[in-house]
Amino acid sequence: MSYARVLCAGLLGMEGRIVEIEADLAPGLPAVILTGLPDKGLNEARERVRAAVVNSGQTWPQRRITVNLQPATMPKHGSGFDLAIACALLTAAGDLPAAPLDGVVLLGELGLDGGVRSIRGVLPMVAAAVRHGVSRVVVPIANAREATAVPGIDVRAVDTLERLISFLRSEAHLLDLPDIPEPPPASPGLDLADVAGQELGKYAIEVAAAGGHHVAFFGPPGAGKTMLAERLPWILPELDDDAALEVTAIQSIAGVLPPHSTLVRRPPFQSPHHTASTSALVGGGTGIAKPGAMSLAHRGVLFLDEAGELAPSTLQALRQPLESGRVIVARANGTTEFPARVQMVVATNPCPCAQPAGDQACICAPAIRRRYLARISGPLLDRIDIQVHLRALSAAQLMTNDAPTDSSMIIAERVAKARAAAAARWSMNGWQTNAEVPGPQLRRPPWRLPNNDTKVLRTGLDRGRLSVRGFDRVLRLAWTIADLDGRQRPSREDVDEAAQLRMGEERADRINRPFSFSPSANRTTAWKEP
């Protein structure tokens, strides 16, 4: 036989696709020709496969070899086709039986010594095999646990090409799957109780976690903006199975999933540097687009520290993904879509000089302050539900730790109850959090609130201090606040409280009447009228 066909899988953005590897051996000068839109890394497979075959004790066929990757119109990239190419060549040369390879997907990169190395994106590739009706898949031993996260398929592991050849000849067995290691003791994580003062900031983080809302912190250096943002993932619930599969697949494609890992359950946290490019933040790059920090934070937290230092064009690129929950990267050779359902936390100083003492020590002219804050544009800021201005701490606030404050564990329990209430309310529509509910849904019966309860919002909208999008986002915040308090529907006080979280103390005061912050009996931190 001079022809053979073996199944493999590739990636097109986030989606795995089945690829058929065809090998044909014909008389002529010895050469290896790859067709089917291979990239540079795949073209180099010719030398990797040749060395691996020879160093595995096999004879390299001295013929004209043509390897075709179908479908020919799909771009192929990466080194995960090596193992399938080697088996297709040896089968076409008559050195391997074809029957054991029927209906089996082979994945893996080959080293020059014949070793099978781990590859990126195994989870979505195996998922594609299941959709294609494949019942068995062979993967590198380092990717075996990741592959078993996909139900409905028989996963086999291999460490060398020689072992796979012996197995196909019925001379040896493949490796058993590695044992699942004992999970390490649960890390307590970062505790909100460690943040001195800033009760308003802590409450904003709690509300954001309970409803899936975006947050913006404005304040001088050392006020606690970064500490608050870094503690948000530790009060979020663990990911369910569907979300964990999505997050694990993204990390696998990006190559940041540790070896022998199973599903990722902890919401991810991404904090790109303020010099990050647009491609690094939302995805892109040359050739096939790759996921950026926004997609790596899918179902978790994207923290933009020193947001005022980010390039304005980079910040503007966030606007559409924040609304749609996905990133669409268009290139000349195709369009790639990545999920990006994130909770964004923005932190920035109020001006370039950023005096630790706050505004009273600022040396910036008013025009400079306005220009600096304008780097976060109005349309982007309008998409951020909670906007909180933090003040510098005094020595008394910093050194006084006697006041009781809730730990992240206690807050996480309240967040879980609030999320459960929201999920039960919106389950018929497929929404899990209040932040996902469309605004029109909240403005129609039976969810529409009485006019008297939304007076502050209607006043702000009529006076041009609140957009229609902001109106809807305040309603979502009000529902989250009611969920945290265990009520079925928001009250007028909840709406007023949500308006202040949305518009800040100064703007809320101008719209209707002032509010003050104080503890309440049923919640550690709450708002009430003075």
Image (cartoon, helix red, strand yellow):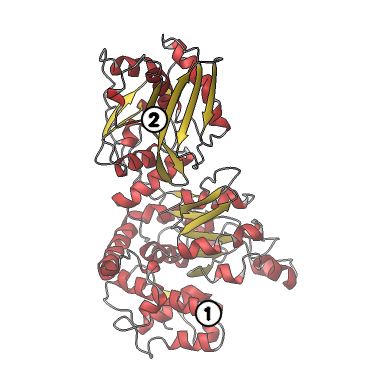
Query: Amino acid type of disc 1?
Result: Ser
Query: Amino acid type of disc 2?
Result: Leu
Disc 1 residue crowd, few under 14, some 14–19, many 20+, Cα 10 Å: some
Res. 117 mark: none
Name the residue tied to disc 2.
107
Q: Position of residue 149 (x, y in %)?
A: 30, 40
Q: Is residue 350 above or below residue 140?
A: below
- Can residue 273 be seen in the rendering of this structure? no
Label tally: 2
Q: Is residue 203 above or below residue 57?
A: below
Q: Position of residue 148 (x, y in %)?
A: 29, 36
| Quadrant in the rendering for residue 434 | bottom left
Residue at left offset 51%, top offset 85%: 461
Residue at left offset 41%, top offset 74%: 518
Q: Position of residue 63 (x, y in %)?
A: 50, 15
Residue at left offset 30%, top offset 69%: 429
Q: Residue furthest bottom?
A: 452
Name the residue tied to disc 1.
467
Q: Position of residue 159 (x, y in %)?
A: 37, 21
Q: CA distance from mark 2 to mark 1?
A: 52 Å
Mark 2 or mark 1, earlier in chain: 2
* Nearer to the camera, 21 or 48: 21
Q: Is residue 64 above or below residue 236?
A: above
Quadrant of the image containing the C terminus: bottom left
- Can residue 424 be seen in the rendering of this structure? yes
Quadrant of the image containing the N terminus: top left
Is disc 1 placed on a helix, strand or loop? loop
Between disc 2 and disc 1, the foreground one is: 2
| Quadrant in the rendering for residue 361 | bottom right
Is disc 2 placed on a helix, strand or loop? loop
